[in-house]
């Protein structure tokens, strides 16, 4: 038994090690990409599509949240950080102490849709009302002209760029209400809101559009007298829809070599931008693409 | 008198119910997982990379990653654990230090898996500079399963009757010769069982590998043990909570769960068979 | 002459063997100490990274504050109480479910069940023990939560109850197998004496067997509790993760383990938030250490009895 087991183990180990080195990966340039969960599928399909046009690189993609990506880039562990919010001052400061220079690239536009379940007959909401709901001052749907139901607010967790973006732009840096339900990802918020007849949530436009039949997507008006706008692709692209943002990637210093090629492809309208469009994000206007391309030496 | 019998019957029924509860739980779990995943299992699924945003294609790199992780973990943990156990059972003298070791093993087993993730990140990834890699994750998992291997190896060694050792020593063997040639051969099957169970535990753990090297998607297989890797538990977790199109990726998740369960269950089965076989063979 | 030569040769050979034995003994001692070394490494690491929090942040608020909001741009708060409560309630719920079923099942297996049933049931329990936590978490997320939502019409389907039920199922194998061992190691003579005195089987179980096995059963429960406290993935996916203080089992709660898992990836190295997560880790470690210590003591008494 002892001899046979040893033999089996040796065979298994050899097999596994052989498979490793057979992949020929050691000659390829490695690019590690991590960060925003809003961008996770985008980054994954980018990777999938890019290696079809360039076989000299091997890419690895993970999520964890914008904060995670930026933190790991600052720690020098990854090459590209995906972020659904801009890098913060204190993150730049820490980066400098580690000798890292974060370079920001806008890579597409995203709208944040405000969703509720189908039974809430409110069709539009103003910034003030949204702020009131999410900082806890508005507690009941009837304050917005809806049914007499307690509002259950869903949101993201603190490691999410969407969470941070919403806090900065909608809440004006106010604190979220303490009973907000922090969920792990966009799809979880959609699940929760679709099934909760008192719920409200904020998700990336693409996620809402995918499940539009189960949700009530609210029109948003910036001021009390403004025009309420629906979060469609066109409205976000023209800037009419008030809750929209850029999505970013960060690299350490200006990218060179294979990394630069990859970033160029991401900004290319037939490359990464097309992928973003297929996923429901808004590709960058040409003049912004050119601004970003300047950053690559 | 009659009331007492009735009462006892009721109690017995309740007790039987608790047994039934266990069976039902497993049945329900298996039912949902099988019904969700069996449609996905095919040769393509098992041997291809995921494509199309994880909605189609296969889970080959995750399977490979999990298997490699298990192998590497075992290579590290097995010698450490077995020799630890040998020391503790055969050589250690009762005393404060031995008690400390026992307490340490017990506590290692109780440390939450997320704390292992933290320590793995800080110690192997950052401090030792191994980076996010297969080897960092394997080292972390090795410490995690160490108590299991030590505990089961200890039991296996203790099950060997004392007179075998005494006989060997009486005939002039040294302690090491006794242990190596007389005790170990009989204890090895039990140690094997414990190791297989530890292995199945390592295969299913998620929290320690998230922070030490698991990636959601890689375009190619890892090129060495110092590279990131894909693994079944992490992919299951991420797809279940992050996917933008949960409906479309759900079959992949179920398929991955099914494969993971098959791996884990196969190993448990092998461990049980080995244990039963040798239990019958060595009837002291 | 020959005899002398013969003795000399044998003596040298013995010296080498003894030397080898001693060296191996020292090496094995090193191996034996690895467990201690690792646990010390873990503890030291937690302390090194966690203690700075108490120097930078508000240590008193950590233990008494009821708000956990480290990423607030205005006033970051590091109160651990919501998570301690979350861990406590979810574990309590799991205990309430798992202990009666677990002990009942172990009694059933040890005393009442037909051997054939035992042989089928025990592997099933081992299989349940081997299922990875992420699978349980997934089941709770997708299926169990919907059932609870249908049954109780709760506001959130990811809540403490979902987490408790799932944790209970994970605790059961530990409780059942260890309790069953304890019950089975009660000497046959005690049971026979009781029956001989006229007590019924159930009276024997209730009055003689279970009390005799009590320390083993207690140890089993305590170990199960330790497992529940330290569980990460299942509670991460099942409990909703709202860091608020609430006693409503149907509301979302966050455990200490989930907090570390959620926030660890995002914190910049060296920030106060980073250190606070290690501080939570220290608290977790301390709690599981104490629980394991108690279980160890109880187990020791149990082993010594028979």
Image (cartoon, helix red, strand yellow):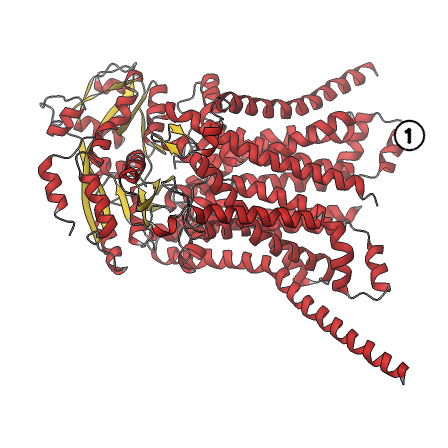
Neighbor class of circle 1 (other Cα within 10 Å; few <14, some 14-19, many 20+) is few
From the viewer's perspective, is C177 left or right of A90? right
Residue at image coords 65%, 31% = C125
Is C291 drawn above or below residue A37 in the view shown? below
Is C67 drawn above or below residue C45 in the view shown? above
Is A40 drawn above or below residue C23 in the view shown? above
User: Nearest the camera: C123 or C287?
Assistant: C123
Q: Quadrant of residue A290?
A: top left
Residue at image coords 17%, 32% = A283
User: Nearest the camera: C173 or C244?
Assistant: C173
**Residue C150 visible from this viewpoint:** yes
From the viewer's perspective, is C178 left or right of A77? right
Q: Position of residue B226 (x, y in %)?
A: 42, 53
From the viewer's perspective, is B29 left or right of C51? right
Q: Which residue is mark 1?
A: C196
Q: Position of residue A250 (x, y in %)?
A: 23, 47
User: Nearest the camera: B97 or C190?
Assistant: B97
Q: Position of residue A28 (x, y in %)?
A: 33, 49
User: Nearest the camera: A263 or A67?
Assistant: A263
**Residue B94 visible from this viewpoint:** no
From the viewer's perspective, is A86 left or right of C26? left
Q: Position of residue A278 (x, y in %)?
A: 24, 27
Which of the chains bears the disc numbered 1? C
Residue at image coords 15%, 52% = A297
Q: What is the count of numbered marks? A: 1
Q: Quadrant of residue C126?
A: top right
Query: Callout 1: helix, strand or loop?
Result: helix
């Amino acid at each position: 038994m002892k001899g046979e087991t040893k033999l089996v183990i040796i065979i298994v180990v050899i097999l596994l090690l052989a498979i490793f080195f057979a992949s020929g990966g050691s000659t390829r340039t490695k690019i590690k990409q991590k960060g925003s969960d809003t961008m996770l599928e985008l980054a994954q399909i980018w990777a999938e599509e890019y290696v079809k046009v360039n076989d000299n690189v091997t890419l690895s993609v993970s999520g964890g949240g914008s904060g995670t990506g930026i933190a790991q880039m600052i720690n020098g562990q990854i090459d590209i950080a995906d972020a659904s919010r801009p890098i913060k001052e204190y993150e730049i400061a820490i980066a400098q102490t580690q000798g890292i220079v974060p370079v920001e690239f806008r890579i597409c536009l995203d709208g944040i849709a405000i969703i509720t379940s189908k039974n809430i007959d409110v069709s539009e909401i103003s910034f003030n009302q949204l702020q009131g709901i999410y900082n806890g001052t508005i507690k009941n749907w009837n304050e917005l002209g809806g049914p007499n139901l307690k509002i259950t607010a869903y949101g993201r967790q603190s490691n999410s760029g969407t969470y941070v973006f919403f806090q900065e732009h909608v809440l004006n840096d106010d604190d979220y209400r303490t009973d907000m339900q922090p969920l792990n990802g966009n799809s979880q918020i959609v699940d929760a809101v679709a099934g909760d007849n008192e719920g409200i949530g904020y998700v990336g436009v693409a996620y809402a559009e995918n499940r539009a039949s189960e949700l009530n997507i609210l029109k948003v008006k910036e001021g009390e007298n403004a025009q309420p706008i629906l979060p469609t692709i066109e409205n976000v692209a023209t800037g009419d829809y008030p809750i929209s943002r850029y999505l970013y990637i960060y690299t350490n210093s200006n990218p060179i070599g294979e990394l630069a090629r990859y970033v160029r492809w991401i900004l290319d309208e037939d490359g990464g931008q097309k992928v973003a469009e297929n996923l429901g994000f808004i590709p960058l206007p040409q003049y912004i693409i050119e601004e970003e391309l300047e950053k690559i030496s | 008198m009659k009331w007492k019998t009735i009462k006892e019957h009721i109690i017995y029924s309740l007790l039987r119910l608790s047994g039934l509860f266990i069976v039902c739980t497993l049945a329900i779990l298996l039912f949902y997982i099988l019904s969700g995943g069996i449609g996905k299992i095919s040769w393509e699924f098992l041997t291809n990379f995921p494509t199309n945003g994880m909605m189609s294609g296969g889970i080959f790199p995750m399977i490979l990653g999990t298997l490699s992780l298990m192998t590497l973990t075992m290579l590290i943990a097995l010698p450490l654990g077995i020799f630890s156990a040998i020391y503790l059972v055969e050589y250690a003298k009762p005393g404060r230090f031995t008690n400390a070791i026992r307490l340490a093993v017990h506590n290692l087993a109780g440390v939450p898996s997320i704390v292992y993730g933290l320590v793995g990140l800080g110690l192997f990834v950052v401090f030792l500079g191994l980076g996010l890699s297969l080897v960092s994750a394997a080292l972390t998992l090795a410490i995690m399963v160490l108590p299991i291997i030590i505990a089961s190896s200890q039991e296996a060694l203790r099950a060997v009757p004392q007179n075998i050792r005494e006989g060997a020593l009486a005939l002039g063997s040294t302690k090491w010769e006794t242990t190596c040639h007389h005790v170990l051969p009989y204890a090895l099957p039990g140690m094997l069982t414990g190791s297989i169970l530890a292995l199945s535990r390592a295969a299913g753990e998620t929290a320690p590998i998230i922070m030490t090297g698991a990636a959601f998607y890689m375009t190619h297989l890892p090129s060495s043990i110092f590279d990131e890797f894909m693994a079944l538990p992490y992919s299951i977790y991420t797809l279940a909570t992050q996917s933008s199109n949960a409906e479309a990726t759900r079959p992949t998740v179920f398929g991955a769960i099914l494969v993971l369960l098959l791996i884990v269950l196969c190993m448990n089965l092998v461990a049980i068979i080995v244990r039963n076989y040798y239990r019958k063979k060595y009837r002291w | 002459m020959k005899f002398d030569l013969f003795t000399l040769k044998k003596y040298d050979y013995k010296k080498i063997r003894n030397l080898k034995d001693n060296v191996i003994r020292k090496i094995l001692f090193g191996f034996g100490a690895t467990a201690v070394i690792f646990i010390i490494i873990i503890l030291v690491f937690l302390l090194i990274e966690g203690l700075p929090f108490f120097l930078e942040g508000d240590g008193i608020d950590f233990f008494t504050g009821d708000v956990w909001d480290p990423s607030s741009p205005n006033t970051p708060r590091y109160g651990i109480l919501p998570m301690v409560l979350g861990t406590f309630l979810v574990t309590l719920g799991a205990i309430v479910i798992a202990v009666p079923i677990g002990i009942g099942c172990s009694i059933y297996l040890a005393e009442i069940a037909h051997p054939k049933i035992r042989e089928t049931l025990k592997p099933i329990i081992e299989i349940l023990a081997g299922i990875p936590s992420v699978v349980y978490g997934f089941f709770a997320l997708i299926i169990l939560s919907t059932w609870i939502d249908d049954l109780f019409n709760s506001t959130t389907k990811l809540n403490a109850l979902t987490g408790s039920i799932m944790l209970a199922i994970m605790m059961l194998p530990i409780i059942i197998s260890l309790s069953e061992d304890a019950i089975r190691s009660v000497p046959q003579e005690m049971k026979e004496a009781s029956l001989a005195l006229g007590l019924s089987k159930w009276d024997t179980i209730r009055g003689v067997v279970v009390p005799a096995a009590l320390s083993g059963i207690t140890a089993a429960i305590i170990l199960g509790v330790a497992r529940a406290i330290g569980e990460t993935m299942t509670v991460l996916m099942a409990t909703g993760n709202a860091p608020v203080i609430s006693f409503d089992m149907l509301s979302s709660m966050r455990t200490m383990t989930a907090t570390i898992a959620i926030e660890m990836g995002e914190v910049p190295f060296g920030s106060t938030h980073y250190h606070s997560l290690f501080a939570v880790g220290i608290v977790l470690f301390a709690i599981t250490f104490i629980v394991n210590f108690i279980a160890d003591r109880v187990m020791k008494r149990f082993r010594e009895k028979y």
